[in-house]
Image (spheres, rainbow, N blue to C red):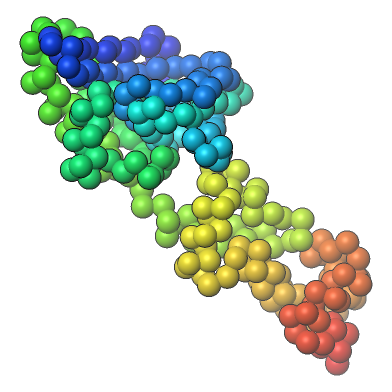
Amino acid sequence: MFFGKNNMLTHRYFSDQSERVGLGQLSKSVRLDFQNLRWPWYAVVFIVKGKGTYVDHNGHEHPLRQGMYFQRLPQLKHSTFIDTSEEWQEVFFDFGVKTYEMMLACQMIKENKLVGFCEISKSLLETHRQMIDKLKECESHQVPRLLPEIIALLQDFFAQSIQESPSVVQEACDYLRNNFHVSDKIQDFCQLRAVGYESLRKKFKEEMNCTPRQYQNLFRMEKAVALLTQTSHSIEEISDQLKYCNAFEFSKQFKKFQGITPSQYRK
């Protein structure tokens, strides 16, 4: 555990009540975190440990896991659920609407990127913990002076963000090459990697000029050709190795890609 089960959090308002800022490190154990929440302020949550699901205002589900973050935008309805089979630990930053609008205008945050990847180091977690103590213990008139420090810390967190687009597509390619059987599905990779299928499919097509399914089919056909030319296995045996339901279906798919049947190819 990065931090114990003793939750640490504080929210402080400016002395004139015009703005607020909050920080926290929490352990949670209930499945329903928030449902159809319209958060009145801005918050960003970094997942230190655990898995869950973020449902955005359009009803789209985003798998969550350790090393990711998600945003709660002001007044934008969303839900968050926790997978209680694993321990959940999170770190959060919370700001008032005026600070949110300033950070948005300065492009410190991106409202169209509701979830992302961001591995947090232990040293940064310790700095965050110290900032909680600092915010908790300061006088009300000192809160505005701490705000720039807290924003700078949030930027340090975001500086560790992973540019996941190239790597996740490469990971998907590796997965599909290692899991090329008919029974293997790209959705299994998405669940394992906590990546939304439609998001991955779009990025995959942009970079590979084909869908994950097409890529997997092409690689499977390469394996079929190798088995036909380098082994004496029967068509039925090759079909079974590639997990087709029967030799007829295998021959049908092979002909679609090669223009001839497996038997004709072997001749």
- Give above or below for 177 relative to 262: above
Q: Which corner quadrant holds the C terminus? A: bottom right
- Give above or below for 122 relative to 131: below
Task: Let me know if residue 133 appears in the view.
Answer: no
Task: Give the side of residue 81 with respect to residue 225, left or right.
Answer: left
Give residue 263's quadrant in the image.
bottom right
Task: Give the side of residue 99 with respect to residue 36, left or right.
Answer: left
Give residue 114's quadrant in the image.
top left
Task: Give the side of residue 207 with respect to residue 215, left or right.
Answer: left
Task: Give the side of residue 91 with respect to residue 204, left or right.
Answer: left
Q: Can you give x and y, in whole percent of width and height, for residue 19 in the image?
A: 19, 19
Give residue 76's quadrant in the image.
top left
Q: Can you give x and y, in whole percent of width and height, for residue 132 in the image?
A: 23, 16
Number of marks present in the image shown: 0
Q: Which corner quadrant holds the N terminus? A: top left
Q: Can you give x and y, in whole percent of width and height, for residue 233 in the image?
A: 86, 75
In front of the other: 228 or 107: 107
In front of the other: 93 or 55: 55
Q: Can you give x and y, in whole percent of width and height, for residue 125 in the image?
A: 29, 26
**Residue at screen point 24% across, 40% down:** 104
- Give above or below for 11 relative to 56: above
Task: Let me know if residue 212 appears in the view.
Answer: yes
**Residue at screen point 78% across, 79% down:** 256
**Residue at screen point 75% across, 84% down:** 258
**Residue at screen point 15% across, 13% down:** 14
